[in-house]
Amino acid sequence: MPLVLLVAVARLLVLRLAAHTAPVGLLGCNTTCGGVEVPYPFGIGANCSLPGFNLTCDHAHDPPWLLLSYGAGSTVPKLHVRKIHLGNGTVYVTANGGTILNHTSNPANHSHAGVLGGGGRDDGERRPGPFVLSCHHNKFVVLGCNLQASLFGDDYRLLTGCSSFCTLDYLDDSKQQRRWEVVWEPTEGHHCGRCSGNGCCQAKIPLYYPMYDVKLQRLDGHHHHDNVDQVMQNLVLIAQDGWIEKVWCWMVQGADVSHLRGRKPPDLSKIPMVLQFLMNLTYPRKRGKADNTTSCPTMDADSNCKSSYSECIDVNNPFSNGYMCQCVPGYQGNPYLLDGCQDINECEHPDLYPCYGVCTNLPGTYECQCPRVSHGNYSMMHGCVKSSTVL
């Protein structure tokens, strides 16, 4: 093959690869930090993100940390971003102590918990940031003995709660020394059981809120000075669903769990949680009652859904309004960028798009047919059979 033809073929291949490589961020902007991809509307540095989505790449750590902060005046510590998922509008973060709502030996009647910044209370027109705590991915967790905890929204609406109990164990025959201990429920061959009320309880968070209050109540007021492990004294937090089951055995005094031996105890200053982000996040005029209006902009120029193959998804409920962008079916990529949503070649993914015949990729879809001189069901293995009559 002549050299000129080889060069032409190579250039054509590069052009085809470039055409199928969806953009991640704005031109000239870094799109990774410490191995974490940073897709637009998020960005690192000036003019690389939408307002409220600016992140910081902290090179003081090795590897670098991708950080999310709430700006000046926020009391919430910076969050360590572990993953950004545009498809469902979630950000997986580690809160450096930011989700511990209360950790004291004497429960307070009300302890304000600024879990997320930027929400504010009903004091005029509120303009929150783009983030709320995902009610589908997090749990309200309580660790302690004979403790009831209730979680309130920033409008003092009761959201959820649970109670945790321990048993009183005497350490000597004189019954002068005693200690509250967890009642173990052995399951699956180990001691810890589940976080289901025995020194640990958890509850779903049913609604989206940017800020929370917690109310603690002792269920054994005259015994609260008995010997209890320090970590077990009124530890109330919000954490990613599934986290507490993996670590809470370490949080009780005397826990001897064979399958956890050799592992480091959990770092309670680094608790994972999941945020939900929305475009144009606002609150209904009357909290608890949906506005029943679309949040999707009526003019394309006002929408953050920039790809030609993207669509706006309303995310409205009685407690928050907003929208998110998604690629239409048959396309994938970044809906917030021009040319960000690109065609899925279904023929390259037979595990997701079964075709046991001849597969042809089409814009936004694909076509599957039995091979020539055969017929049958091309969607199942060996479904195409050779025709007995060939025309």
Image: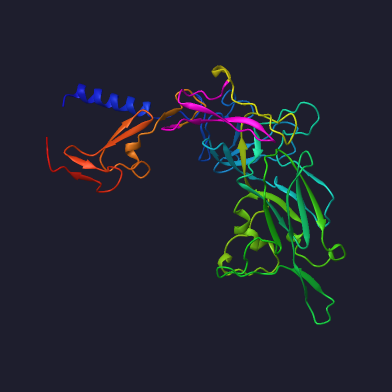
**Is residue 41 at least partly visible in the picture?**
yes
- Camera-side residue of 287 and 190: 287
Give how far across and how far down residue 53 sits, in percent. 61, 30
Q: Residue at x 33, y 38 (%)?
A: 348
- Residue closest to the far bottom: 173
Q: Residue at x 84, y 51 (%)?
A: 108
Q: Position of residue 219 (x, y in %)?
A: 82, 61
Residue 77, quarter of picture:
top right
Left or right, 306 with respect to 275, comes to left
Q: Is residue 110 left or right of residue 92?
A: right
Q: Is residue 328 magenta?
A: yes
Foreground of the two, 319 or 303: 319
Corner quadrant of residue 319: top right
**At 76% from the left edge and 39% from the top edge, which residue is drawn?**
154
Quadrant location of the N terminus?
top left
Rendering coords of residue 61 (x, y %) = 59, 42
Quick check: is 265 in the magenta stretch?
no
Q: Who's the residue at 69% across and 35% down the image?
A: 318
Q: Which region is colored magenta? A: 303-332
The image quadrant where one finds the C terminus is top left
Snapshot colouring:
rainbow
Can residue 53 be seen in this snapshot?
Answer: no
> Residue 256 is drawn in which quadrant?
bottom right
From what the image shows, is residue 42 above or below residue 236?
Answer: above
Q: Looking at the picture, does residue 287 appear above or below residue 185?
A: above
Q: Is residue 261 left or right of residue 372?
A: right
